[in-house]
Image (cartoon, rainbow, N blue to C red):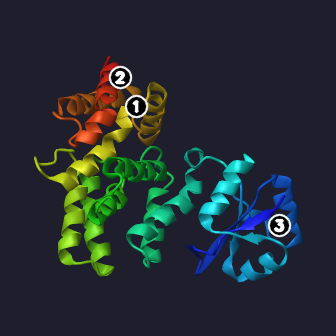
Amino acid sequence: MAIYLDPPLWPAHGTHFSHLVSDTSLEELHSFARAEGIPERAFDGDHYDVAESRYAALVAAGAVPVEGRVLVRKLIASGLRIPARRRSGSLKLPLLTRWNEVLPGHDALFLDLLDRWGEEHRNYHGRTHLLAVLEALDLLTAPAAPPRSVLLGAWFHDAVYRGVAGEDEEESARLAEDRLAHAGLPAEEVYEVARLVRMTADHRPDAGDEAAALLSDADLSVLGGDPTAYARYLAAVRIDFAHIGDADFAAGRAAVVRQLLELDPLFHTLRGRALWQDAARRNLHAELG
C-alpha cells in the first residue's frame, strides 16, 4: 500500500500541479489527503491535483515520488483508474504529455487550446476526438513520429467549433496562423499548419500530398471503428447538433454520409486504407440504409 506523487508538470493558475494517487484504494487516498489538508475540491475521480508548493511536504509525509508514466501504471494496476475516454476532463494529462512532445515551453497556448477543445457545447468534437486523431497519427507513421506540422494541424483543426462546415475550418486556420506566428514558428511552417487545417473542410488532399493525407486519414479514422464504437460516434455527433430537429438532422447527416462515400479513395495512405477503409464503408452504408 502506497501513495504516489508525480512531478509538478501540469500548468494552471499561475503554477504547476502534481497528481496524487493510491495503488490500493480511494479510502487510503482520501485519508492521506485529509491528513495533509488537501481540499476535497482537488479530487478528480481517481487522483488529487496538488500545487507544486506542496510537493516537498507531501513527499516528506510519505508520498512516493515517481515519474508520470510510473504513476499511471500504478493507477492502472490498482484498478482505480477512470479510463480517459469516459471523462473528457481527465484527458488533460495525456494531452499535456503530447503537447510537450510537439511544442514544449508554450504552456499558455496549450491551455488555450485545451479550453477550446473542452467547451461545453462539444460532444464528439471535443478532447476525446483530439486524442483519437493524435493516436491515429501514431498508428499511421509508426515507428517514426508524425511531422510536427501534421501534429499541430491536428491540435488546431477543430480549435474553433460552432458546427458550421467550412467556416469552422477557416477560423481554426486563422487561429493557427495567429497563435503559431506569435509563438515564433517559421512562416513556412505556420503556412503549412494552416493549409492542413483548411484541408479538413473537405478531406480531399491532392495526390502526393503526404502530410494532408496523414491528417485526413487520422481525422476520419473514427469511421472505421467496430459497430459499437461507430454507434457511440453517431450518438455523440447527434448531441453536438441537438439544436437541430430530427428531420433536418437526418437530411443533413445523410448528405454528409453520401459525400464521404463519394470520396475515392476515402483514405489516402496505404496504412489508413488497410486499417479503416473496409469497416468505414460498411459503417457508412449501414448508416445510410
> Which x, y percent locates residue 270?
23, 40
Q: What is the three-letter code of the residue carrying label 1?
A: Gly
Outermost residue toward the top? 289
Circle 1 residues within 10 Å: few <14, some 14–19, many ≥20: few
Task: Rate crowding at label 3 as few (under 14), some (14 to 19) or many (20 or more) other CA atoms within 10 Å.
Answer: many
Which mark, residue 245?
A: 1
Q: Which of the image's four quarters has the N terminus?
A: bottom right
Q: Amino acid at mark 2?
A: Glu
Q: Is residue 3 left or right of residue 222?
A: right
Q: Residue 105, position in %: x, y? A: 44, 79
The residue most toward the front is 143
Q: Are marks 2 and 1 in contact (CB under 8 Å)?
A: no
Residue 11 x/y as whole percent: 56, 74
Residue at (33%, 60%) from the top-left corner?
151
Q: Is residue 96 left or right of residue 255?
A: right
Quadrant in which residue 263 is drawn: top left
Mark 2 or mark 3: which comes first in sequence? 3
What kind of residue is marked 3?
Ala
What mark, if any, has residue 33 been given in the picture? 3
Identify the residue under disc 2. 287
Tell me if I can see residue 45 in this picture.
no
Residue 225 rendering spot, x and y as whole percentages: 41, 32
Secondary structure at badge 3 equals helix
| Foreground disc of the pair 1, 3 | 3
Q: Secondary structure at mark 2?
A: helix
Q: Secondary structure at mark 1?
A: loop
- Check the image and report above or below for 269 versus 246: below
Answer with left or right where residue 170 lies relative to residue 162: left
